[in-house]
Image: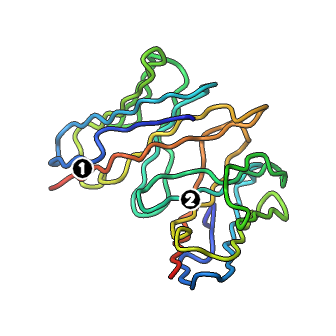
Amino acid sequence: DTAVSQTPKYLVTQMGNDKSIKCEQNLGHDTMYWYKQDSKKFLKIMFSYNNKELIINETVPNRFSPKSPDKAHLNLHINSLELGDSAVYFCASSRRRDTGELFFGEGSRLTVL
Amino acid sequence: EDKVVQSPLSLVVHEGDTVTLNCSYEVTNFRSLLWYKQEKKAPTFLFMLTSSGIEKKSGRLSSILDKKELFSILNITATQTGDSAIYLCAVEASGGGSNYKLTFGKGTLLTVNP
């Protein structure tokens, strides 16, 4: 069983569309994250949730809206997609909010045309 | 703003060589430094370092932290082609209250040729 799974793995869409990426972890972890890895390979945190509560919200455009229906799921919805949103989006989880040992999903490659 | 700088950005070696990857950082409220290995897809955790001067070891990989000089190194001895990957350094620092966040470096792309 995959510990942190994301869907879809690949997403190609037009500018202006709205899309969602889903993430689920079966590790029983309390904390989940969304990271963005751009073309320069920089991994940057976007959001973090702890037991469904938003605890970190970096300076991300409000077109990006995370939702955590329960502590095992963290979804990312993106409105009005722009070219600059093209990247690989990684979901991750950790046992607690105060540990840096993250377990990453395999990533969702978003291409905006 | 927290900053993590890795060097070199890329490195090509032959199997059997020993490599040293560097990571320097400038962060406020430092908590730990971590190394991750990213092959084709997901980064996977290698080490977490919190104390200066104590080497962490796993097989042919080892790492050490210097909190005075604000850097860490990751050593890989007797490299194998399977070590080819991007090695990411990240620093965990307080994001306010009991929240901590990781700041990643750009990574070092290691290529091990047979």
Q: Quadrant of the N terminus of chain B?
A: top right
Instruction: Indicate which disc residue B80 carries.
Output: 1
User: Residue B101: image x %, image y %?
Assistant: 64, 40
User: Residue A13: image x %, image y %?
Assistant: 57, 84
Type of amino acid under label 2: Lys
Q: Find numbered disc 1 in the image and state the secondary structure of the residue it sits on.
A: loop
User: Where on the picture, by quarter, is residue B60?
Assistant: top left
Same chain for the residues under marks 2 and 1 in the image: no
**Relative horizontal placement of residue B55, taking residue A28 as reference (left or right):** left
Q: Residues within 10 Å of mark 2 (few under 14, many from 20)?
A: many
| Residue at horizontal 56 percent and vertical 80 percent from the top | A11
Which of A40/A25 is in front? A40
> Looking at the image, what colour scheme do you see?
rainbow
| Residue at horizontal 37 percent and vertical 51 percent from the top | B86
Which of A94/A44 is in front? A44
Q: Chain of mark 1?
A: B
Q: Find numbered disc 2 in the image and state the secondary structure of the residue it sits on.
A: strand
User: Residue B20: image x %, image y %?
Assistant: 28, 34
Mark 2, residue position? A36
Q: Chain of mark 2?
A: A
Is residue B66 positioned above or below B101 on the image?
Answer: above
Q: Quadrant of the C terminus of chain B?
A: bottom left
Is residue A4 positioned above or below A44 on the image?
Answer: below
Is residue B42 positioned above or below A77 on the image?
Answer: above
User: Residue B39: image x %, image y %?
Assistant: 39, 58
Type of amino acid under label 1: Gln
Residue contact at pointers 2 and 1, CB within 8 angstroms: no
What is the total number of numbered labels drawn onto the structure image?
2
**Relative horizontal placement of residue B41, taking residue A66 as reference (left or right):** left
The residue mark sitting in front, 2 or 1, is 2
Q: CA distance from mark 2 to mark 1?
A: 30 Å
**Relative horizontal placement of residue A52, taking residue A81 as reference (left or right):** right
